[in-house]
Amino acid sequence: MSIVTTHSAPPGRLREFWTYFSENRGAVIGLWVFGILLALAILAPVIAPHSPIEQYRDALLQPPVWQEGGSWRFVLGTDPTGRDMLSRLLYGARFSFFIGLVVVAIAATGGILIGLIAGFARGWVDTLIMRVMDIILAFPSLLLALVLVAVLGPSLLNAMIAIAIVLQPHYVRLTRAAVMGELPKEYVTAARVAGAGRLRLMFRTVLPNCMAPIIVQGALSFSTAILDAAALGFLGMGAQPPTPEWGTMLAESREFIQRAWWVVTLPGLAILITVLAINLMGDGLRDALDPKLKRS
């Protein structure tokens, strides 16, 4: 009679990550809210009842369905030009997530590359790079983005480029600090002895071990990008009408705030809920990925 002994395998990385992440209830709630908003953004062409730019001149500033004068034709009411608020909010979510994704991709890619160069090169190259980053960080982020958009010209594309430039120094400093912490370790020395070249050391050996703080920064930058894009849109320097971007919607409707609260309140709530959900997720990612916060 043979006795089969089973050993409980240690939890995988994904299970360990979820264990630490799920301990933060706020992060789990943020993840659910983010998932719902993302699904609504992806399915906007299917579930939106109207075109976001179609104007219904017979329903200008119509209130939401629960108020007197509202109708189920326009569940969340209409804006000053008769466009459906629900459809514009749904399509606005697509623009906001697209902005966040593009900005984080540009800022992270450039920031990681420059940070790796600064961390490996040291000397005058490192000093020059970090002084340039310090100069960029010395300016208020929104003000610098506003100046860059004023130079490039007001548009959604230029706004995304400007926000990415403003966010890039955070990735540079974070990557450089992580690289300098990893270089003295034994596995890097062993890779050098084994004949690994500079590029292999950068991208195959050191960078994968520096990704945890960068991922957390990416989540936080995602919400910052959405917020800054909305601010630029509100100031008329981001997405231009009739683009259904939340900040632009606020700018178009600010003069009607006293007589039609929904045209300003609903886009503002959309920005608030989205940014809050992403920030809560960022806290959970920090708890799950930062080894200093993990309990042994």
Image (cartoon, rainbow, N blue to C red):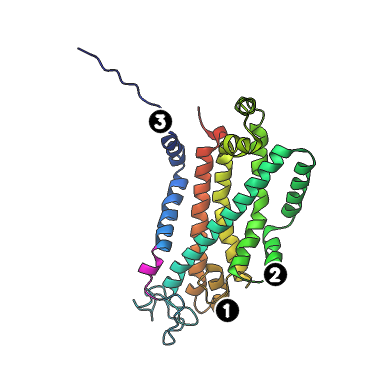
Q: Tag 1, which secondary structure?
A: helix
Magenta stretch: includes residue 88: no
Q: Is residue 10 above or below residue 74?
A: above
Q: Tag 2, which secondary structure?
A: helix
Task: From the top left corner, tell me how far across and down residue 23 is, in percent.
Answer: 44, 39
Q: Earlier in the sequence, mark 3 or mark 2?
A: 3
Q: Are marks 1 and 2 in contact (CB under 8 Å)?
A: no
Q: Earlier in the sequence, mark 1 or mark 2?
A: 2
Neighbour tally class for label 1: few under 14, some 14-19, many 20 plus, Cα within 10 Å: few
**What residue is disc 3 on?**
11
Q: Type of residue at label 3? A: Pro
Please give the name of the residue rendered at 58% of the width and 41% of the height, measured from the top-left corner.
213
Q: Type of residue at label 1? A: Glu
Residue 173 in view:
no
Residue 87 in view:
yes
Q: Tag 3, which secondary structure?
A: loop
Neighbour tally class for label 2: few under 14, some 14-19, many 20 plus, Cα within 10 Å: some
Cα gap from disc 1 to disc 2, whole angstroms: 24 Å
Please give the name of the residue rendered at 68% of the width and 68% of the height, measured from the top-left corner.
152
> Any mark on residue 150, and which?
2
Q: Are marks 3 and 2 in contact (CB under 8 Å)?
A: no
Q: Is residue 180 left or right of residue 28?
A: right
Q: Type of residue at label 2? A: Ala
Q: Which residues are magenta?
A: 43-50
Task: From the top left corner, tell me how far across and down residue 216 is, in percent.
Answer: 55, 45
**What residue is disc 1 on?**
255
Q: Nearer the viewer, residue 195 or 270?
A: 195
Please give the name of the residue rendered at 34% of the width and 21% of the height, measured from the top-left corner.
7
